[in-house]
Image: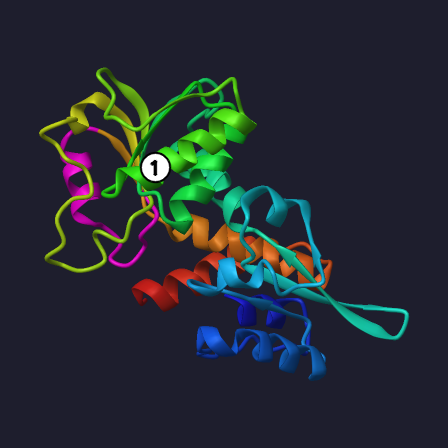
Amino acid sequence: MHNAAFKTLGLNWRYLAFEVDPKRLRAAIEGARAMNFAGLNLTVPHKLLAFKMVDQLDKSAKLFGAVNTIKFEKVGGKIRTIGFNTDADAIVLSIREELKLKLSGARVLLLGAGGAGRTAALKLASERVAELFLINRTRSKAEQIAREITKRFPGVSVSTLYPKSNVDLILNATSLGLKPGDPSPLDEKQFSLRQAHAVYDMIYRPAQTRLLATAKKAGCKTANGIGMLLQQGAKAFEIWTGKPAPLNVMRKALERNVYGD
């Protein structure tokens, strides 16, 4: 999607993928700085590691404790690294666009308390959802995030148990659904999909996970994570180039690459 956007705007830029061992991440960032890269995107497990490896943190990175985008900026003859988090805003933008859902005052069931789950939980809390139910296989992780939210966003009610009544949104931030044989991340013995208005799965490949297929049958509005991937990429593009991202071009290129023609 980035290369398609560069071409559309007539920029002589290239977006390239590199596999980097976590132990060599600092060296990779320094190498990119030395080679005058405009920026970097980072994925798991580098997002948490990079938080302590950049010269400066944008407020988005400070708020969510993770860096998925780095910008190299020349200041006084030197190049400094600035860390951003474009994932959090992308989650909300995608939910609003794909599901037409108002998050302020909503009741949300969030599945997963890993890196993606933590970012999603904090962003939802910052959007002033009314109630947030955090479910994770290791309950202590969910409890840790719940304590952080209670401290930072005291107006949001947080629980680490399944809700007893209907919710506006179920958000899957786990990896369950990536493989064909994966079970659903939702324990339907404890909560029925018929009690949810909408279901968002961060997974985008496959396009329809078991959770989304079951949710559709239950009458829920559904969306996968392709919109989130697009939005976080578009924001990174704007950080690097200072130009508005050509969203339609990027979406078409992304969908063609992920799902084929």
In the rendered view, tell whether residue 224 sits above or below residue 29: above
- Residue at coordinates 49% horizontally, 21% vertically from top-left? 104
Quarter occupied by residue 13 = bottom right
Front in this rendered view, residue 112 or 251 = 112
* Magenta span of residues: 201-219
Q: The disc labelled 1 sits on which kind of residue? A: Ala
In the rendered view, tell whether residue 51 sits above or below residue 28: above
Residue 87 visible, this orientation: yes
In the rendered view, tell whether residue 50 sits above or below residue 228: below
Asked if residue 217 is among those painted magenta in the image, a careful observer would answer yes
Residue 91, percent across and down?
46, 42
- Residue at coordinates 54% horizontally, 42% vertically from top-left? 89
Instruction: Read off the residue under disc 1.
Output: 142
Asked if residue 106 is among those painted magenta in the image, a careful observer would answer no
Residue 138, percent across and down?
25, 43
- Residue at coordinates 55% horizontally, 67% vertically from top-left? 2
Q: Is residue 40 left or right of residue 149?
A: right
Residue 152, percent across and down?
55, 28
Quarter occupied by residue 67 = bottom right
Residue 56, percent across and down?
72, 57
- Residue at coordinates 52% horizontally, 60% vertically from top-left? 249
Colour scheme of the rendered structure: rainbow
Q: Quick one: label 1, few (<14), some, or many (20+) residues within 10 Å? A: many
Residue 17 visible, this orientation: no
